[in-house]
Amino acid sequence: MERWRTHTLLPLVLDALGLTGTDPATRRLAEAFGGEPAAVRERLVGEPARRSRRLLFASGGEIVLHDDAVAAVVLHLGPTPHAPRGLDLAEWIDGADGDATLEQLVTAVGAPRHFAGFGTPYLTLDGGYARLDFRDRRGWNEPGNLLSITVTAEEPGRTTRPEDDDCPSCSDLLVRREPAGGVDVEATVDALAAALAVGPLTEDAHWVRLADLQPLHASGLMERVESQLTCTTCRRIICLTLFRDSPPTFRYAVLDEAMRRPLEPIPPVEQWGDAARIAEEAGSMHHVDHEPGAWFLLEQQGVLYLHARYVINTMLDDSALIRLDDTEHEAYRTGGRSYISRLARRIHDGSPHEKSSPFHQRNLLRGPDARSYRDAVAQAVVNHTWLAEQRRR
Ligand SMILES: [Zn+2]
């Protein structure tokens, strides 16, 4: 049996996961945290709504309930507004204290260590996971950097973090209809657009643009229309979805979940956009042809662009965007698709990431307008990517 099972209070935490707030196991944990919470924070999250309840104890303990089931237990080690001294970790994990490094925690708990993405170490326990938060999401080799330990039944990285329910940047962007409930689409789109304009949100061009969401929905051409926006503070992805036959939803997802959400091909703008939107589309980049997994040929106001993948090494690949010059343009006119395949091959084999490559200087994704080129490409190929194939299934 692992040492922590017999020598610490940690089993109290694991016992409570998934149980209701009034279950004896949850009561025992609350007693160990000092009895009554010093503060209770409550809010509805998303739509369909989930009730998030955070019980903050003066000892540094915290119990997070989702719809009255314990979703997470947090041991806060640093001072917090409700717990000026922080939790005494030695009472909870034998052989560890507030100065513990990652290595010391692995030894003290005797459980395997993993990483959920960059900078998020966690330990696999019997019946749960302990995510370890260190200062600046690194610094786990020096003492004094451990901020908190969050114990959940869900594996870290697979779903949103319970503490993000209260993210200051994105948790108040959903506007509900009064008094009926549900998403007030108009007001929510306005709130999201405002957050996009000033910064905390970024828009994912692989989905429906927020500005296009309502016109596309109104056209009735799509079964479900979805925009995805990423919060730069908590990294959650907001998925706002309007359905032809059911009420709108507003969900928070992690990248893996968000990528798997379905989306049908977006119909041509002429079928749903107003005159201004159609004019805008006429001036933007368009898909001409592509070879799955290799290249896209794009056109914008008579200029051709080639977006080609290349390999840096066996672990890493990237892509380059090249504006076809007059000679290449002419070669395409006479040689067609097979000429583009040969050109893409030259880019693929030409190491555009190296300064010596003839494609290095020409790669528009390295220049000052890289971001806007990336978005333009993403929007032009939105119906033609591998991801688009996947989410149609
Ligand atoms: Zn956020």
Image (spheres, rainbow, N blue to C red):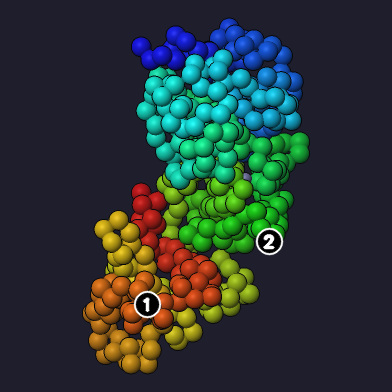
Rendered image quadrant of residue 125: top left
The circle on residue 355 is 1
Q: Is residue 360 left or right of residue 292?
A: right
| Nearer-the-camera pick, 330 or 201 | 201
- Kind of residue indicated by mark 2: Ala
Q: Residue furthest front?
A: 142
Q: Position of residue 82 (x, y in %)?
A: 73, 26
The number of callouts visible is 2
Write the residue at 55% across / 18% down. 90
Write the residue at 61% across / 31% down. 50
Query: CA–CA distance between discs 1 and 2?
Result: 36 Å
Q: Position of residue 200 (x, y in %)?
A: 65, 54
Rendered image quadrant of residue 364: bottom left
Write the residue at 25% across / 73% down. 349
Image height of 106 relative to 190, above or below = above
Mark 2 is surrounded, within 10 Å at the Cα level, by few (under 14), some (14 to 19) or many (20 or more) other residues, namely few
Mark 1 is surrounded, within 10 Å at the Cα level, by few (under 14), some (14 to 19) or many (20 or more) other residues, namely few
Which callout, 1 or 2, points at the residue further toward the start of the chain? 2
Does dot 1 land on a helix, a strand or a loop? loop
- Residue hosting label 2: 197
